[in-house]
Amino acid sequence: MVPLRKPFFFLFLSLLCCLGCNKPVHQDRSAAPNVVIFLSDDQGWGDLSHSGNTNLSTPNIDQLAQNGLNFDRFYVAPVCSPTRAELLTGRYHLRGGVSGTSAGEERLDLDETTFAELFQQAGYATGAFGKWHNGTQHPYHPNSRGFDYFYGFCSGHWGDYFSPPLEENGKMVQGEGYVVDDFTTKAIEFIENNRKSPFLVYLPYNTPHSPMQVPDQWWEKVETRELEMVLPEDQNEDLPFTKAALGMCENIDWNVGRVMDKLKELDLEEHTIVIYLSDNGPNSFRWNGDMKGRKGATDEGGVRSPQHIRAISGQHSSGLTRSLLNIKTGEMII
């Protein structure tokens, strides 16, 4: 597959147009596929078993690649907020006013249109669950940018991953359990509540970003694991940090599996487009396919991301696949 960068604005316009969503979706439910987007935080291209990393197992994410479109060279920004702004708009992050990750530099300009707003206009129920990091207060808040429902946190960093204070549609609430599990549970509830109408679910997870807090059941899986793919000694890989990241990635994979199982249970699996990617390269020096650089660097290791799209089956699948493959490729600066 050829290199691809920031096609999302055109991707979602293609989905809305080619699948008939330019008319109210209640008139033709079969023409309006559901969409689920997973975005991990600081997960490198190499942090998946699909990429060849034998240090961990990510079978559910691997299945998305094996049963859908796998973009072999997909590039994002080297840090968080710019990538998230580009995903939301399909535009180069500086054109949306996002130049950094803090001090207001992460806010997405108010004259930008997000894909969530387009889905709202097409009659979709829209929900976001996790880390926003493109503006904290209204009118930058996700509820003001196209999402009917938001559960998570809006800042770029959260210091406690176990039942922390979170936000639900602008109100502070107490989280329940490990944050990624909690976000996924809320997303599954949203899917169940909207299963009879088209929905957009955005799951911007906040792991394997630090702090490296891992539930015991996932840490115990990796704590004594003999790692086969480690960096040379002169690169000073922090093995406990690597193992914590691996545990977090396997937890993400389990949660991806939870969503896919729910879609199958509700007979929505073949009517839902599922997208998976990360926001930048790994947050430590660990195996990443021998690429130079990590998070924060513009070297390939800092900007190459996994990107998988599991398209729908049935009468619209061939048209969707053609639309995806016909997206303009290469660097897209709009």
Image: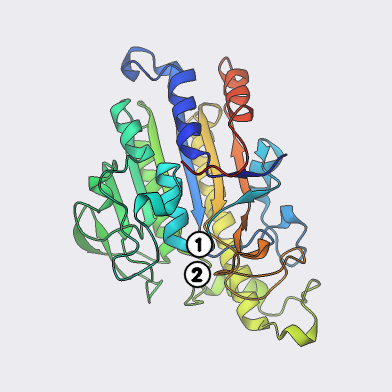
x, y (%) of residue 40? 52, 57
Q: Is residue 181 visible?
A: no
- Residue 89 horizontal side relative to residue 47, left or right: left
- Residue 200, image quadrant: top left
Looking at the image, residue 331 lies above or below residue 217: above
Q: Which mark is residue 41?
A: 1
Q: Which mark is residue 198?
A: none
The amino acid type found where label 1 is placed reads Asp
x, y (%) of residue 11? 50, 33
Q: Are marks 2 and 1 in contact (CB under 8 Å)?
A: yes
Q: Quadrant of the N terminus?
A: top right
x, y (%) of residue 108? 32, 53
- Residue at 71% across, 46% down: 72
As helix, strand or loop, the secondary structure at mark 1 comes to loop
- Residue 146 horizontal side relative to residue 232, left or right: left
The amino acid type found where label 2 is placed reads His
Looking at the image, residue 63 lies above or below residue 118: below
Mark 2 → mark 1, Cα distance in angstroms:
6 Å
Looking at the image, residue 220 lies above or below residue 112: below
Q: Which residue is mark 2?
A: 209
- Residue 294 horizontal side relative to residue 225, left or right: left
